[in-house]
Amino acid sequence: MSKFIVAGITQLETIVKVKEIPIKYEPYTGERDTIYIAAGGDAFNESLALKWLGNDVEFMTVVGENEDLNIFNPSNRGVTLSTEYVLPIIKETPMEVLLYDTRRKAQRFEDLKDIRNASYDMMLVDPLVPSCDMMVLSNVNFCRPFISRAKDNNKKLAVKIHSYKRDKEIYNEDFLKNADIIYFNDNTIEDDPYDFVKEMAGKYDPEIIVLGQGENGVLIYDKYKDFSAHYNAVNSKQIVNTAGAGNALFACFLHYFLKTGDSKISIHKALLFASNYIGYMGTSNGFMTEEELEHWDNLIWNPRNAM
């Protein structure tokens, strides 16, 4: 078991399954089991995935001053996240509406409210940093002070870049320059994937870059193993919901990378973990324990062991 500090964006999400993206205008559509409302966001989903995998997780985020924190721990879920470090210090909790189809295409409508003005109480963080194994951050303003804590204490720093945009890169340079492991999603990246990863590796010199490519899988760069490689997505279940799949994949990768130090093993496990996740509705469902993941990994890749 590893110990993670996870800090970043948490949202209230409305997820809607549609026939296809882009959507065709219709004045009314009535479909059962196509709309789901729950907590979500990078920090919440990553924390939950890491907790399911058996890790010790300190979940740090900010929410609206009147938010009911019970939304983070529904009674029918198998694990509980501590909300001790969920600070109700902004006017409203950020919100997102996500439309997706079975081809893993998605369209997001995001309202981050006043989260850009939030300041996290670092006196809560400082006593926890020395004992953590890795810090996982979103590139949101209140997470910037976490960077120096990780570097001063010689802790691994992983950063998930939320909606990368070339013209906004300068605002994320402190995250990019200091991260050991960086996750990007290719939804907003128009460059050739290999060229983009090569550029980011040359400019910021991280140990690992993971570029999520949706239905096309993932591209991974490993500085010390000196390789960049594409891995296809794993299709183990019927696709029900793709929202948050990148968070699930990234969290599982970090879990196994800390455990094994091997990026190839870690991405292999993470792709299977994410494939199970997208077979369930909602961004906080469909996670496996490590035992369950190892079981399915063994069945799929070593079918003789199932006999």
Image (tube, rainbow, N blue to C red):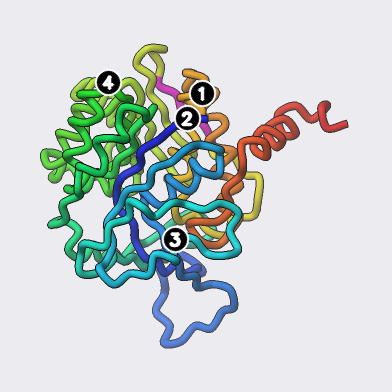
The Cα atoms of the two marked residues, 3 and 4, are separated by 31 Å
Q: Which residues are magenta?
A: 228-232
Which of the two labelled residues, at mark 3 and mark 4, occupies the earlier sequence position?
3
Q: Which residue is most to the bottom?
A: 27
Q: Depth check: 254 or 220 in front? A: 254
Place of residue 187 in the rendered image (x, y in percent of width and height, measured from the top left): 34, 48
Based on the picture, tell me whether residue 277 belongs to the magenta stretch. no
- State if disc 1 and disc 2 touch (CB < 8 Å): yes
Residue 72 shows in this picture: yes
Q: Is residue 27 above or below residue 229?
A: below
CA gap, disc 1 and disc 4: 18 Å
Q: What residue did someone put label 1 on?
A: 259
Q: Does the CB distance between marks 2 and 3 fall below 8 Å?
A: no
* Residue assigned mark 2: 2
Can residue 22 be seen at all in this image of the molecule?
no
- Of labels 1 and 3, the one closer to you: 3
Q: Is residue 227 above or below residue 218?
A: above
User: What residue lies at 26% left-to-right and 67% top-to-bottom?
Assistant: 64
Snapshot quadrant of residue 91 = bottom left
Question: In front: 136, or 297?
Answer: 136
Secondary structure category for the residue under label 4: loop
